[in-house]
Image: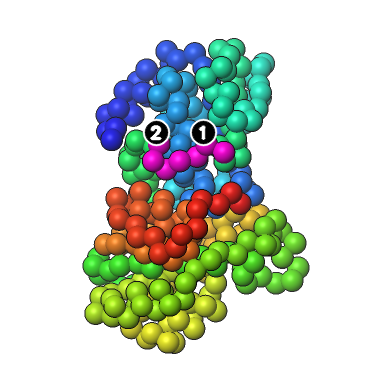
Amino acid sequence: MLSRSDIQKYIKNYSKFNKNVIYDFNVNDGGVADYIKYFMYLLQHCMNKNFRLHYKKNGLPLESYIPIQFSELYISQDKINNFKNLDSLRSLDTFENINNDIYYICKPNCMYKNFDFDFINLKFSDVFYFSDEVILNKKNIYSDNSLNYISIHLRLGDKHLELDKKDKKFVYTKWDEREFNSDKLSDLIEKNNKKKILFFCDNNSFKQKLKKKYPFISISSAKVGHTGLSISSKREVLDAASELALLAGSKEIYSVSYSGFPLVAGKLGEVKVHKLHNQKDLII
């Protein structure tokens, strides 16, 4: 595992590198976990190859709620507009062959084919951090100050997002439904009934029903939203970032269905994530 000093060394030598890649993450490119994991994956590639990685600031709320620790990596659209040679990186398969005189824009979709958590040899917490606003809001959505809790995360998928009819047109993946085993979920809760359990779900109705069935579990008061949708409010994005921070503060995380959210939380908090599903990585 590379250390923070390795990242600092990379930053120190930044100006000596000749090849440039610009990470461009915007609304509709994914949720909070995608925002983090694809940057980390690209940063690892750039550090391995001594390429300069730039993060294009798009004015997203996520950029202020979960910022990068190294301001040297940020680049503005105004500065990009002054570059004479720009191109889009369509796949990391061509990564080694990029030219010195071109700035290559890389969106998350250029990494879909190659992405692998195991490739990343950096601590996520050495690159990203939670802002003071997130730390404060974390206490607002879950007032219990106990640090000794386990987390259970269930994502039902975009098919089950609780949206008004007029807002459903903004969901591009209406078919997205995550598999999970309800018996495994029940067994997990019942076997850990003496522990403090914090349950997370992308569907509030399901969350409330489970709380009614198992009154001893805890849920946050976060407003359920999806940070990858253009209709998400700033409040919903803040709550999503705050729930990620809560997950990262768990003793253990149980992932009941496939989602990058608990995996990234585990990386940020260096917390073990137990998978209770067999679904492989999804490209949404």
Residue 70's disc number: 2
Q: Is residue 93 visible?
A: yes
Q: Is residue 141 visible?
A: no
- Residue 117 inside the magenta-drawn segment: yes
Foreground: 97 or 201? 97
Q: Are marks 1 and 2 in contact (CB under 8 Å)?
A: no
Crowdedness near tag 1: few (<14), some (14–19) or many (≥20) residues, C-alpha within 10 Å: many
Residue 249 percent location from the top left of the image: 31, 59
Q: Is residue 156 above or below residue 125?
A: below
Q: Is residue 266 left or right of residue 176?
A: left
Residue 257 percent location from the top left of the image: 48, 64
Residue at (29%, 50%) from the top-left corner? 270
Q: Quadrant of the N terminus?
A: top left
Q: Is residue 52 above or below residue 29?
A: above
Residue at (32%, 81%) from the top-left corner? 190
Residue 61 percent location from the top left of the image: 54, 50
The colour style of the image is: rainbow
Q: Tell me the quarter of the picture where residue 191 sits.
A: bottom left
**Disc 1 from disc 2: Cα separation:** 10 Å
Q: Tell me the quarter of the picture where residue 126 sits.
A: top left
Kind of residue sitting beneath label 1: Tyr
Q: Is residue 199 left or right of residue 249?
A: right
Residue at (52%, 19%) from the top-left corner? 96
Residue marked by disc 1: 55
Q: Which badge, 1 or 2, comes first in the chain's sequence?
A: 1
- Residue 199 inside the magenta-drawn segment: no
Kind of residue sitting beneath label 2: Phe
